[in-house]
Image: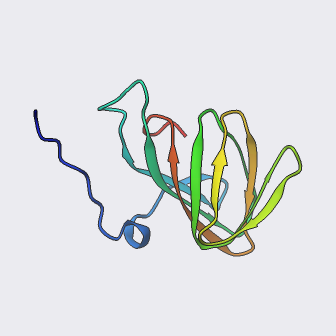
Amino acid sequence: MSCVAFNYYAKAQSTFKPPLIANENAYLGDVYSSDKNDPDKPITAGFFRLEKGTPLVYEYTYHEMKIILEGEFEISDETGQTVRAGPGDVFYFPKGSKITFSTPSVGLAFYTGQRKEGGA
């Protein structure tokens, strides 16, 4: 049996800076992905940061779970469901859902999605 090492990113919540991905205020960056080790069922994790400004509308092409770490978000879907979310709140966004994210100031979330690295 061969040994496999784990990956570690110290203080990622405070030191990892996700790149701008949309509008003037939406940042997202993958920290780790299993796609090189398990290309058929990859899991990718990283951080999503949204600043006050243009709401981000995103249609999921994969399943994702998100936990709010800092600040607050207003999260809504096409069914009319709306939640004001804060630290500790956990969300599951099924493949095919169309979600609108906004914030009155700034919010930071950690996500893990069933997709390849860079596939958001």
User: In the picture, residue 38 is in which quadrant?
Assistant: top left
Question: At x 75% / y 41%, what residue is drawn?
Answer: 98
Q: Position of residue 51 (x, y in %)?
A: 65, 68
Q: Position of residue 22 (x, y in %)?
A: 63, 51
- Where does the C terminus fall, quadrant-wise? top right
Give left or right: position of 30 versus 91.
left
Q: Position of residue 113 (x, y in %)?
A: 52, 42
Residue farthest front in this picture: 1
Give left or right: position of 35 versus 50.
left
Question: At x 27% / y 58%, what residue is drawn?
Answer: 8
- Where does the N terminus fall, quadrant-wise? top left
Seen in the picture, residue 9 relative to 29 is either above or below; the reply is below
Question: At x 66% / y 38%, what residue is drawn?
Answer: 60
Give left or right: position of 9 versus 31.
left
Question: At x 79% / y 62%, what residue is drawn?
Answer: 83
Residue farthest top in this picture: 40
The coloring applied to the image is: rainbow
Residue farthest right in this picture: 80
User: In the picture, residue 79 is in which quadrant?
Assistant: top right
The number of callouts visible is 0
Seen in the picture, residue 105 relative to 47 is either above or below; the reply is below
Q: Position of residue 65 (x, y in %)?
A: 58, 49
